[in-house]
Amino acid sequence: MNRTRLVLMSVAATAAIAMSGCDPQPDSDGTATSSSPAASSAAPTGSPSTAAASTAAIDAATVKACADIKKDIKDNATKIAKAEKIGPPAGHFAVSAQWAAGSVAILAHSIGAGEAVTAASEKIQNEMMGLSDAYNKSADAKPSKKALDAALKELDTACLAA
């Protein structure tokens, strides 16, 4: 039983890590989004225009992170509902693996976001991993999601402030 659990969790973790780096949406204009060396050296370091551009880039990254994280949360909820339909005795492994995979996706999309959004997404990730652990321990687990709901509200607040 423990060997099966280890194998299933290893496969799920590997798949989650592999999928977290994938971006299923191609660029709409087909061009690279990185800045050219000429554009980055146009303003001297430390000038007000550089600081404003840096803040705007962080804000844009935060807005994109918020949208991606909220999409991840909705997608994860759908996948968890499917996994819960499997039912005991094996369904709890699928639910546990999906909570873990969803937490990795949220963590991956929070990279580069503002501090408040990153902190809130880390709390969500920690709560999701806690739920994963709870479902992994028992086929009949019904862990409370109150802490996750509070973390989601914190993310909503952080995203509104961005």
Image: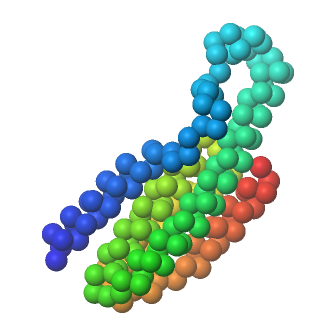
Residue 46 vs residue 20: left or right? right
Query: In which quarter of the view is residue 84 placed?
Result: bottom left
* Residue 44 percent coordinates (x, y): 76, 11
Residue 48 vs residue 87: left or right? right
- Residue 123 visible, this orientation: no
| Residue with the most extreme front position | 29
Out of 160 and 74, give the one closest to the viewer: 74
Query: In which quarter of the view is residue 148 placed?
Result: bottom right
* Up/down of 5 relative to 103, above or below: below
Out of 76 and 42, give the one closest to the viewer: 76
Q: How is the structure coloured here?
A: rainbow
* Up/down of 34 relative to 144, above or below: above
- Residue 79 visible, this orientation: yes
> Across the whole image, how many numbered discs are drawn on residues?
0
* Up/down of 82 relative to 25, above or below: below
Look at 60% across and 57% down and name the residue there. Answer: 69
* Residue 116 percent coordinates (x, y): 68, 52
Look at 72% across and 48% down and name the residue there. Answer: 63
* Residue 110 percent coordinates (x, y): 58, 49
| Residue with the most extreme right position | 48
Residue 117 vs residue 148: left or right? right
Query: In which quarter of the view is residue 96 placed?
Result: bottom left
* Up/down of 10 relative to 54, above or below: below
Look at 56% across and 46% down and name the residue there. Answer: 25
Placement of the N terminus among the 4 image quadrants? bottom left
Look at 63% across and 61% down and name the residue there. Answer: 70
* Residue 97 percent coordinates (x, y): 36, 68
